[in-house]
Image (spheres, grey):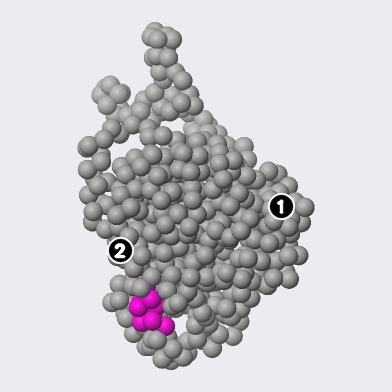
Amino acid sequence: MSVLKFETSKINKKCPVPRTVSSFYHPSSVPKKFGVSNLLKSRMTSSDVSSASQPQKGLNPKITSLPTTIFEVMTKLSIAHNSVNLGQGFPDDEGPESMKKIAGDALVDFHNQYPPLMGIPELRQAVARHSEKFQGIPVDWATETLVTVGATEAIASVFLGLLSAGDEVIMFDPMYDSYTTMASLANATVRPVRLRLPDFSVPLDELEAAFTPRTKFILINTPHNPSGKLFTRAELETIAHLCQKHDVLAVCDEVYEHLVFGGGEHVSLRSLPGMMDRTLRMGSAGKTFSFTSWKVGWVTGPARLIAAAAKAHQFIVFTVPSSLQRAVAYGLDNEHQFYTTLGESLSRKKELLESGLKKLGVPTLPGNGAYFLIADVSRFLKPGETDVDFCQRLTVEGGVTLIPTSGFYVGPNPPRHLVRFCYCKDDSKIKAALERLEKYLPTQ
């Protein structure tokens, strides 16, 4: 790692590097005649222990004040009650075996030291080819690509690299929860624009009103989490016009770009006229190949913006495991059949879930992307009950776990009658959930 240079020849060999407290008191480092507990007692009095266990220094309120996410709450509740979990957004099926083999072989066939900060050339070149092949967007792999630890780290690096205190960011409500946290850490202000129900369309008048002289960038997530919405070409053209009119950058979270079906079309904002030099795009191997544990993502865009994100990236994680990068590079170039047919397979799963919910009298909202389905549970709510209350009750009593959609909103007074289903699951799990819903919902 090039950030810190350390010459061992300058170490005073009479003063060995101190060990951590945990290693100093490891049983192997303590003479048997003392014992660990006796040694600890001899070095620390009870008042020392009390004082040490209650430090008075404050912590970072931007982090410590964050609530437990609804995802963690519902997952723990699901485990406790052995429910069918259609809440958490990860697929049951995994990606190509060829990529697993390449990742494993790479650990043996290549060195295991720090790969380049920006990512290995093989993956950055593959990302550039992928961009031009599927969106017609040419990319200079040497200056316009950055490999990250998943798209979440891409978000962090982009936000910290681009935003300054006092900047504003326009985001569409509801949204992925990482966005607002990173904006806060960058001392920026979020200007949410609420998508209109029932189709999550963009309110163009409200969008234009959100632009101010302090707006640094607008964030577009399409296909959209949590709704499954695909931003239309007309909506994107309006966004492009406003960005150029107000000299605003754009950040596009396009991790679900291949998860499109039902006649929908994924259009990247960067492909539109005038947006090439002011837009960053983020992608994810976790979503593209159903390998969410690998945490390999990427960002493409103009060299000036990529360089800014890379400055943040080097001090967050510095680099990404090279064995996984090699496997993803292979996948982007050689496993087209897998990721270009994901939409078709997800369409069948959505139809299975949606038709079952229709039979139960549960209305659903439109969406042709990602793997999420929003349902309206108004008629099943008890007096005074919210979507959060309903999802908790459904988990405990009905044995099915969903995510309350209000947890994705940052603006005031979010809708409290919508829930999110995740259908990238085995058909057997979807059917089991529908069977449990059929037994439970009619009793309400």
Q: Main secondary structure of the magenta part?
A: helix
Query: Residue at the location (50% across, 86% down)?
Result: 363
What residue is disc 2 on?
337
- The amino acid at mark 1 is Asp
Q: Quadrant of the N terminus?
A: top left
- The residue carrying pointer 1 sits among few (fewer than 14), some (14 to 19) or many (20 or more) residues within 10 Å by Cα, namely some
Look at the image and say whether residue 100 sits in the magenta stretch.
no
Who is closer to the viewer here, 73 or 196? Answer: 196
Is residue 396 rendered to the left or right of residue 66? left
- Residue 247: image tag: 1
- Mark carried by residue 102: none
The image quadrant that residue 180 belongs to is bottom right
Q: Residues within 10 Å of mark 2 (few under 14, many from 20)?
A: few
Horizontal and vertical percent for residue 176?
54, 61
Q: Magenta residues, as a range?
A: 346-354
* In-image side of 438 versus 174 (left or right): left
In the image, what residue occupies the spot 58% across and 52% down?
Answer: 276
Question: Residue at the location (22% across, 43% down)?
Answer: 105
Position of residue 17 measured from the top left corner of the image (x, y, whole percent): 40, 18
Residue 338 on image: x %, y %: 31, 63
Image point 68% across, 43% down: which residue? 164
N-term mark: 2 or 1: 1
Reply yes or no: does residue 349 show up in magenta.
yes
Q: Of residues 138 and 33, which is closer to you in this image?
A: 138
Instruction: State whether residue 249 appears in this view.
Output: yes
Report the Cα–Cα distance between label 2 and label 1: 39 Å
Q: What amino acid is found at the position of numbered circle 2 in the picture?
A: Gln
Kind of element beneath mark 1: loop
